[in-house]
Amino acid sequence: MTDMSDGPVITRFAPSPTGFLHIGGARTALFNWLYARGRGGHFLLRIEDTDRARSTPEATAAILKGLTWLGLDWDGEAVSQFERAPRHAEVAREMLANGTAYKCFATQDEIEAFREAARAEGRSTLYQSPWRDADPATHPDAPYVIRLKALREGATVIGDKVQGDVKIGNDQLDDMVLLRSDGTPTYMLAVVVDDHDMGVTHVIRGDDHLNNAARQMQIYHAMGWPVPVWAHIPLIHGPDGKKLSKRHGALGVEEYQAMGYPAAAMRNYLARLGWSHGDDEFFTDDQAKAWFALEGIGRSPARLDFKKLENLSGRHL
Ligand code: GLU
């Protein structure tokens, strides 16, 4: 495997523009920003607007505005994932050519029938396509999707900087679709192609993407691309330790701005949500950039603490 540690650090924030800039997203962006800025690297922004039904220009604008208010400047232009769809399709075709992907002509009904039979027999319902090893000479002239020829034996190990070695049995991973029959890429393919093309060296994101990492890793391997360093950070919880939701109070960054909290205090506060440097609670950007390291990220979910934010705000004002 190629080593990515020689060049500059390149991180990214890759929000899906379906709403406001969520406090959890802001923290993810901040961690990526601190990591890159503290190492003379680059912090990139990619808008994951491939899902046309859910993505809106208003949401993109709100995210850019939130990041700008927080002072998290990104390098270069924000990348639109949707605009890169032709490149994603090209990679799917390269995988076809190198034998790590295949054309699957199964219809929705056939897939449903497979699942029903599997359920009835108590087998795994992960779809196993009969087209996986089919001779191309037998291919019909019909619509098809391109699927990854996933490994069926063994396990995929994600050497995660926060979670440690996470092992996922390959029997848990199906031959996921890379390119739909209408020629549009799936999210899983798009993320890997974009991270690779953007030269991303470190992927720091919520641990709700940990399972995706195992699937994404198989795409990196199929293409012979170097795998980035992964750091999956625990999600933020409410003060009661429960999954963050509206009843815990403000979730959008713009709400904190409207309440008059200074951006510097927000950065300080968000940095401490899940990351620590000794007992330091109050610090400047320069200190945070110098101190921030993946080793300082905790494995348990951080809890929102509004008193702490109040206190930090007073000190930053
Ligand atoms: N677009 C994804 C999200 O908003 C992030 C994908 C990633 O960081 O790899 O959850």
Image (cartoon, grey):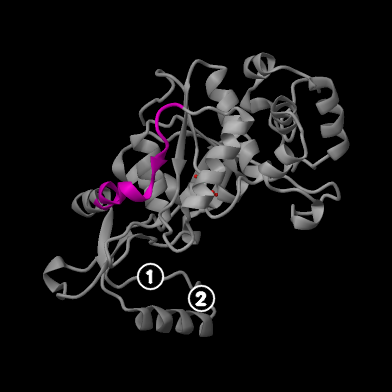
Residue at x-position 26% and y-position 70%: 131
The reply to whether the magenta stretch includes residue 252 is no
Residue 287, placed above or below residue 98: above
Mark 2 sits near ligand 1, with its Cβ under 8 Å away = no
Query: Can you tell which mark lies on residue 123?
Result: 2
Q: Amino acid under label 1?
A: Gln
Name the residue: 48% across, 79% down.
Answer: 118
Mark found first going from the N terminus, 1 or 2: 2
Measured Cα–Cα span from mark 1 to mark 2: 11 Å
User: Percent x, y for residue 51?
Assistant: 43, 58
The range drawn in magenta is 75-89
Disc 1 crowd rating (10 Å Cα; few below 14, some 14-19, many 20+) is: some
Residue drawn at (39%, 25%) of the image: 3
Residue 192 as seen in the image, left or right of residue 164: left
Horizontal relation, residue 160 to residue 279: left or right: left
Is 239 positioned to the left or the right of 134 in the image?
A: right
Q: Which element is circle 1 on?
A: loop
Q: Mark 2 belongs to which amino acid? A: Arg
Disc 1 C-beta below 8 A from ligand 1 = no
* Residue at x 43%, y 19% (from the top left corner): 8
Residue identified by numbered label 1: 128
